[in-house]
Amino acid sequence: MSESSLAEMLRSRGLRLTAQRQLVLQAVLDLGHATPEQVHTAVREVAAGVNITTIYRTLELLERLGLVTHTHLSHGSPTYHAAGEHQHVHLVCRNCGGIDEIDPELIRPFADQLLAERGFRVDIGHVSLFGVCGSCENGDQE
C-alpha cells in the first residue's frame, strides 16, 4: 500500500498518518510473518524512540482498518501479516519453529463438514496446524 493511500484511508476515518504507523505497516510488509516484538525490533532500527506499547496499539489499529491480520502460531504473541495476502493455513514446526503456508482449499472439506454438522464456521485465515516439518522428520535440520 502506498503512503498516500494509507494516509487517505486514515483521514477518511478521522485519523492521521504518523511516522510510527507507516513504519509499523512497512515492518509487517517487509517481515512477512512477525510478532509485535519482531516489528518493534525492525521499527527501532529506524526510529529508536518507538516503544512496544505503540507497536501493539498500531497493530490493533491496522487490523481494525483491514490492513493486517493476525494468527497465533505459538503460545506467545500473535503473529501479524499483511491482510492483502491470500488467505492461507499456517504449518508450524514444533521442532525448528519454521512456518510454512498451504492453500486453505486443502482443509475446505473439513471446514465444510464442521459447518454442516456443527454449524461452526472456521476462520481459515486464523488456522494454524502444529507438527513436525519434513526437514526435521527426515533429520535434515542441523
Image (cartoon, grey):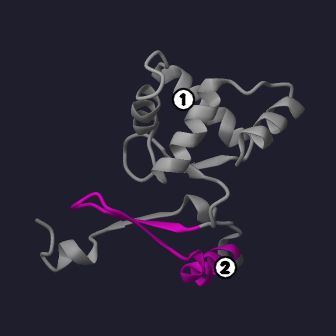
Instruction: Decide if residue 117 is on the left or right side of residue 38.
Output: right
Image quadrant occupied by the C terminus: bottom left
The location of residue 118, given as percent across then percent down, is: 66, 71
* Rendered image quadrant of residue 86: bottom right
Callout 2: 10 Å neighbours few (<14), some, many (20+)? some
Callout 1: 10 Å neighbours few (<14), some, many (20+)? some
| Disc sitting over residue 112 in the figure | 2
* Rendered image quadrant of residue 75: top left
Mark 1 or 2, closer to the camera: 1
| Disc sitting over residue 98 in the figure | none
Q: Is residue 132 visible?
A: yes
Q: Is mark 1 on a helix, strand or loop?
A: helix
The location of residue 109, given as percent across then percent down, is: 61, 84
The location of residue 45, given as percent across then percent down, is: 40, 29
46 and 34: which one is in front? 46
Q: Which residue is drawn at 56% across and 58% down?
A: 126
Magenta stretch: give its range.
Answer: 88-115
Q: Which residue is drawn at 51% across and 41% down?
A: 27
The residue tagged 1 is: 56
16 and 83: which one is in front? 16
- Indicate which disc, 1 or 2, sits on the residue closer to the N terminus: 1
31 and 60: which one is in front? 31
- Is 17 contained in the magenta span? no
